[in-house]
Amino acid sequence: MPSTSQAPSTAAATTHSHTAVQIAIMAIAAFVIVTTEFLIIGLLPALARDLNVLVTLAGQLVTLFAFTVMLFGPILTARLAHIDRRKLFTCILLVFAASNALAAMSANIWILAIARFIPALLLPVFWGTASETAGQLAGPANAGKAVANVYMGISAALVFGIPLGTLAADAIGWRGTFWMLAALCLLIAALMRSSMPTLPAAPQRKQGEKQTLIFKDPRFIAHVALSVLTFTAMFTAYTYLADTLESLAGISPGHVGWWLMGFGAVGMLGNHIGGRLVDRSPLGSSVVFLALLAAGMLAATPLATQHTGLMVALAVWGIAYTALFPICQVRVMRAGAQAQALAATMNISAANAGIGLGAIFGGLGIRHYGLESLGVISTAIAGVAIVLAVLLMRRR
């Protein structure tokens, strides 16, 4: 017969196990959702030929998704934050399943645009509420680690989802790839429905009236601005990393994808480290990884022709790049603690703004100064972000 001291220990272990499973399911959902968002990049040539449109027009589907996330995310998260998490996540995955099915059946670019627009509305709602829910399940002491585990789904999608999806498209076509994603969304929706606990948020009145008060907090706005700067620095160079590897490092086009996969795989370590450090000091860890990001980006260009040195620079860059995803999310959520779901979605909007700005700044840099300038430009932006983070630390 077990002792009374063993019973609480067994119950705690069971609870911890259930929490780990629930967070793992959210991470898998994140993997499918982010793969749905970015997979189209590898499918553009095939779907452009099939739908008889220019690749440049098909590429606007990527822009449509990003700006939809940026513009509608905070509004919809505030409106939907009162819904029980299990129901909300299940419905989001069902919408993604239906949208992917519609994409697979698209007869023209306009139907495909609708199939991309609809899930983009709900992607930031998932990120905002999933991050908050992971923190609720794990408790305050382990919130950063839990959010990082959910964000592992992002890293896995960027490292494996996009390349594997592109390979699948070669085997079963771009339509078959969207059908595959639709089936995965249905499967994860079923798992979410059966495994997630009931986690109701605050009453709708509180969500609707009090959440938006964070927009009147200058410190919260500064944290959102810091995320915009961080992602702008990250994507000024990362958007054109494939071109840098091919043009400056002399890597053959057939091998560039493997270099990018290695970049992301090493970055998975950064996701783990960042998730541990952010619980101690969100701003301090931001400064550390922004400095590492700047060092990696700045060193990559002069070391481009020395592949051993380039691999070291890319490893540092990749670790910092991936670590900053959960760090920014936790940092902004803590800054808007009274409205965490809305705060988390604001960070997603900030990230998308930074992604767009980074692509613009990087393109302008290439046009006027060449690919070699991207390391300097992105490092300068990272430097501005570090200054802002230090100022926030001093005025805390």
Image (cartoon, rainbow, N blue to C red):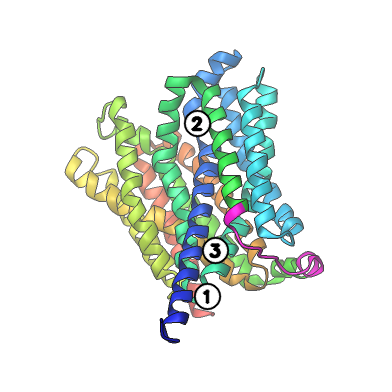
Query: Which region is colored magenta?
Result: 194-209
**Residue at screen point 47% across, 62% down:** 20
Q: Is residue 349 visible?
A: no
**Label 2 SS:** helix
Choose between 225 and 34: the one closer to the eye: 34
- Mark 2 closeness class: few <14, some 14–19, many ≥20 residues within 10 Å: some
Q: State the residue position of label 3.
A: 134
Task: Specify few, some or many for label 3: CA neighbours under 10 Å numbering under 14, 14-19, or 20 or more.
Answer: many
Q: Is residue 186 above or below residue 173?
A: below
Q: Report if the CB atoms under discs 1 and 2 are less than 8 Å apart.
A: no
Secondary structure type for disc 3? helix
Q: Is residue 330 visible?
A: yes
N-term mark: 3 or 2: 2
Instruction: Tell me the tag on residue 140.
Output: 1
Amino acid on which the number 1 mark rests in the picture: Pro
Location of mark 2 (residue):
41
Mark 1 or 2, closer to the camera: 1
Q: Is residue 106 above or below residue 311?
A: above
Q: Is residue 366 magenta?
A: no
Q: Kindly give the residue lying farthest to the front in the view shown.
A: 1
Picture coordinates of residue 196 (x, y %)? 59, 58
- Mark 1 closeness class: few <14, some 14–19, many ≥20 residues within 10 Å: few
Measuring from the top left, give residue 252's x and y in whole percent: 27, 26
Disc 3 residue type (three-letter): Ala
Measure the C-alpha gap from mark 3 to mark 2.
29 Å
